[in-house]
Amino acid sequence: MEDTLVYNYQRPSSLIKKDASEELFLSKYSEIQKTTDAPCFFWGDVSQPFILARCLITLSNIVKSSFNLSPFQMALLKDPIVTAGNSRLRFEGFSHCAGVYARVDVLPDGLHGEFLENGTTNVDFNQPMITALGSIRPNEKIMLSVGEKEVGLYKEGKEIVERKVPLPVKWIKGLSTVQIYFSQSEKLHTFNKIQTQQLFRGIPKGPVKSDYYLIIRGNKPMFSPVKSADAVCIGGLNRLRLLEPLLPYIDQMQVFPHSDMQSTTWQLYMGNIRFSFSLSRESWRGFSGEGAVLDSLIDDISDEWIDALDKYAYANQSFNPSAFALDENINLKTTDNLTGRLAAMGLLGYDLDDNGFFYRRLPFKLNRIIGLNPRMKNAEKLITEGKVEILNKKTARTEARVEGTGVHHTVIIESDKERCTCEWFSKYQGERGPCKHVLAVKKLVSHKD
């Protein structure tokens, strides 16, 4: 075995070297100013008000649901995040336990109005708004306004206005994981209306404690407790019942499983309105605790870069990392790290049909990244306190020892595989992101390299 190596670590304030293309990008986008003087983000009507109302009521019901929280914990969380931008309106929310994510997208041809500015707000849909949505009739004309501090619904001379409320930190953490999982998901199935309705009729009654699998027999999709080849694994299958009110109105449904089955996403298509619905791996697991962005936070990136990419995404309202790296001649690894950081702050959402990210104009705080990811904060603390020793480092294998409370943990990283002797890794086997010990080793080695 090689001699023990102990690396010193200091977080760099900037990248060591920038080439001409990087300097050009930074100079171009660091000067962009985000305007805030528009009276509202969007004002206009929608072409399918009845369908939109049913989608928003379903979204509100999802936000009010919980699969593992107490009533007291449920009272702490709020209602939809509303984003106006790129000629679309998006309404997003989580279940109280943060294990179910839903989004309503009103596409450009479903809106008739004016986008004065792009922006995001977070409101609470109270009973007057739910009642007004429930009373909307097919083909009835309604008007919507989305502003920085409120969302308004106007119909038959009446107006219902919901004011901005604080955005829960748990939601920001959940948003980061969901978007990363979305970007790692691929469409596997498309079902027509009849197939979808038949499929949902096969959901067992009551809570489902074991995994179920989406399988195809002949031309018929069904849920089975028995795993088979090419099956989609679904934990907490009963959560899908939240979609049942929308099934009479859909044209089709598409299913997007995560590459490692850490989530399943179900998209309902209703004309120019799309409803995305994503389930965490199991009912008790909330998206906010999955740690999907942690690997992208290992390499240090300067605040200057993060600020510039935030303004780039704001200016363009959409963001494809591969296209961005090619167009701006930016290193793809740097691009992935920047993407992870913006997602970690809740600034990027992901559109499965567009195969790219969209921008949310949330408060931009550079110090939010570490605060929202305590495992990374603890990993940095382990490094600065000198508790990480690299015992053996080769091209394809790194072995390290990390001091814990009364015990030393062994970390082994081989290519894309990583192991740790700590309780966290033993329990989750890496499915909920790396433990703080693995993060500390990877970050220290990355800094040394």
Image: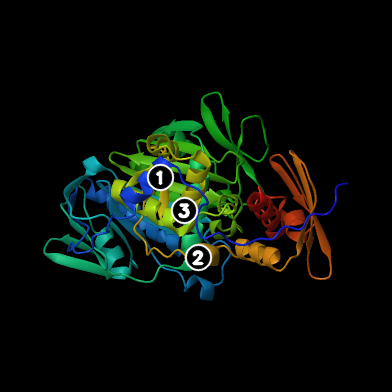
Q: Residues within 10 Å of mark 3 (few under 14, many from 20)?
A: many
Instruction: Give the labeled residue for mark 2.
Output: 170
* Identity, as a three-letter code, of the amino acid under mark 1: Phe
The residue that appears at 36% across and 60% down in the rendered structure is: 81
In terms of secondary structure, where does tag 2 sit?
helix
User: Whole-percent x and y of residue 281?
Assistant: 60, 49
Q: Secondary structure at mark 1?
A: strand
Q: Looking at the image, do the residues carrying marks 2 and 1 touch, with CB atoms under 8 Å apart?
A: no
- Classify 10 Å Cα crowding around label 1: few (below 14), some (14-19), many (20 and above): many
Q: Amino acid at mark 3?
A: Ala
Residue 208 in the image, given as x and y percentages of width and height: 62, 52
Q: Nearer the viewer, residue 387 or 242?
A: 387
In the foreground, 242 or 406? 406
Residue placed furthest toward the bottom: 72
Which amino acid type is shown beneath numbered disc 2? Lys
First of labels 3, 1 by sequence position: 3
Q: Residue 230's x, y, as percent?
A: 62, 30
Looking at the image, residue 86 lies above or below residue 170: above
- Depicted 53 relative to depicted 19: above or below: below
Q: Earlier in the sequence, mark 2 or mark 1?
A: 2
The mark that comes first in sequence, 2 or 3, is 2
Instruction: Left or right? Give the position of 43 relative to 181.
Output: left
Please name the residue shown 66% across and 60% down the image.
Answer: 9
| Residue 57 visible (yes or no) | yes
Q: Which residue is mark 3?
A: 343
Secondary element at tag 3: helix
Residue at numbered disc 1: 357
Q: Quadrant of residue 70?
A: bottom right
The image quarter in which residue 37 lies = bottom left
Give the x, y percent position of residue 326. 42, 34
Mark 2 vs mark 1, foreground winner is: 1
Q: Nearer the viewer, residue 320 or 55?
A: 320
